[in-house]
Image (spheres, rainbow, N blue to C red):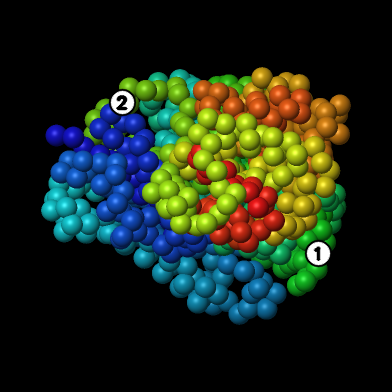
Amino acid sequence: MKRYYIGLATTFHDPALAIVDAEGEIVFAEAAERFLQDKRAINAEPDHLFRIAHLVKEYCEQDAEFTIARSWSASSSRLPFLAGAASRLGLLSPDWLPRAPLDGWSRTLLMRRYQLHHLMLCVQSAHLKAGANLALVMRHRFGNRKLRFLNFDHHLTHAAYACYGSPFSEAVCMIVDGTGEHGSISCYTYRNGRLDRLSRHRGPESLGGLYMLITELCGFSSFGGEEWKVMGLAPYGRTDEAIYRLLRPMIKVAGCGLRYPPMRQLRAGLTRLCRYRRAEGASALEAADLAHTWQRVFSEIMDELLQNLYAETRVDNLVLSGGCALNSSYAGRVFESTPFKRLHIPSAPADDGNAVGAALLAYEQTAGPRKTRQKLFSPYLGSRVSAETLTNVARWSGLRTLRHLPETVHLEAARRLAEGRILGWIQERAEFGPRALGNRSILADPRPREMKDRLNREVKFREEFRPFAPAILHEYGEEYFENYQESPYMERTLRFKQEVRAKVPAVVHVDGTGRLQTVKREWNARFHALIEAFHRLTNIPLLLNTSFNIMGKPMVHTVEDALAVFFTTGMDALVIEDYLLEK
Ligand SMILES: [Fe+2]
């Protein structure tokens, strides 16, 4: 009988769901935040009660057998440790640091008792309700009791998603995140589809946790997932030696693990560090030196970890995942500071990706090795917009500038982009992962210098320092970037060549870099055709590409979401599939 594998990412933040079919192919993957339109969907279930029935109907045969795979192992005895480790340095606002009374074992965990209690409730409730909605719907709506539940180690689900979707037959894999069941770093070897754990860091030390603390001190929200604002801000600052002397001894590398200094020293350092917190209402640029110094420390620690991993394994192919792998600035310079020759980072390295990892592990455990290997996973695994709603808009909206252009929409779009218009672009299936890769994007001409400020001010409503990324035709990568590397998921930041920077100033960050997306025809034919058309008009083979959302919201999910953003921002035109709408 046919069997489906439904993977659930069951951390209390970034819940997600993936479906793998009987052939081992990923047929669907999406973070809950998209459907809910609630950034990061904190405390939400990955298998939303009303949504899950639709997904099962659309992607599965309802009377098949189902395996429900969860992205944390079942050991509830680990949960208090998990809660403490995840939050030890920064998951919650570090307001307490200079003044809070600590007592009992909350003293050991460096947090207030009520904060610990709340966090534990979040973690425990996510764990307890993981898969409950899905089981309810399967049993009572579809009358299907052929359900099997599996739980997998958190870091193993990260590694499975990252390695199975890599182009390598042999690699080493490092997972670096806030924490797993036992600690924040795990290493694996990957050979011919087989994953073996090489080492596991055990303890509360966490680079991801420290990153969250710095995010808070810079005046951003770690709960809101704003670590990348720290990364975007860093190039505006310089190393502050005083901050460096505080930060650097705070976390040490030991093999492929981490160590904190003695507790008294750590607490004293953290307390002094809090003096650098950005004041309420102060410009983000005030925190640029802190962000810059942290990025340096982060990179030094990652360098040491990866150098140690290489020394141990001597394998040239590296797979990097976990939340820290979202640091594209570091990813772009891995080859400069470590001996690795090739790098793969998946499109969703944070906890949402674990839905796919859990489903694939369940498949392999049940059905054996998957047939298709050494093939990059497509990131276009999410929902389509409703064709019916699009037809309704065409019929009922009364919008006179709405046109159906099935043959020429990309040509018309390219022409408007070349004229300096800002364009919303929605096509086919949504991206899985945090970056818009040409299917839920806002696009613009990278040539006008003022385009960046205009987009930040009039469309995204976000801070003036935030950079925009280039989506470039692969054939021109070498021409535009130093030491060009393919970056299919916008996962690495590279330096623009000096001679091209003035051509595309809207996508060149203040330090001369860009977080590029490599676009190939075989990965995304329609988006490739659009950039090609823009290239023919302008002689520029790249577009400014940013996610289709406004600050603080997830990427748009429906036609209605897209129209709401279009009509409430300074966007000039909107393409949804074959429809073009202009203001
Ligand atoms: Fe994780």
Q: Nearer the viewer, residue 67 or 294?
A: 67
Q: Amino acid at mark 2?
A: Pro
Mark 1 vs 2, N-terminal side:
1
Q: Is residue 529 above or below residue 466?
A: above
Gap between marks 1 and 2 measured at Cα: 53 Å
- Describe residue 371's horizontal placement relative to residue 135 as left or right: right
Q: Tell us which disc is closer to us: 1 or 2.
A: 1
Q: Nearer the viewer, residue 465 or 572?
A: 572
**Residue drawn at 86 percent across, 29 percent down:** 498
The residue tagged 1 is: 283
- Describe residue 363's horizontal placement relative to residue 247 as left or right: left
Q: Give the quadrant of the N terminus.
A: top left
Where does the image place residue 321, in percent across and percent down from the top left? 53, 39
**Residue drawn at 49 percent across, 70 percent down:** 116
Within the image, what quadrant is residue 155 found in? top left
**Residue drawn at 14 percent across, 50 percent down:** 144
Q: Residues within 10 Å of mark 2 (few under 14, many from 20)?
A: some
Q: Is residue 408 above or below residue 554?
A: above
Where does the image place residue 213, in percent across and percent down from the top left? 65, 60
- Describe residue 47's horizontal placement relative to residue 389 as left or right: left
**Residue drawn at 13 percent across, 53 percent down:** 143
Q: Nearer the viewer, residue 81 or 341?
A: 341
The residue tagged 2 is: 369
Helix or strand or loop: what does disc 1 sit on?
loop
Give me the disc on residue 120: none
Q: Residues within 10 Å of mark 1 (few under 14, many from 20)?
A: few
**Can I make out residue 372 in this image?**
yes
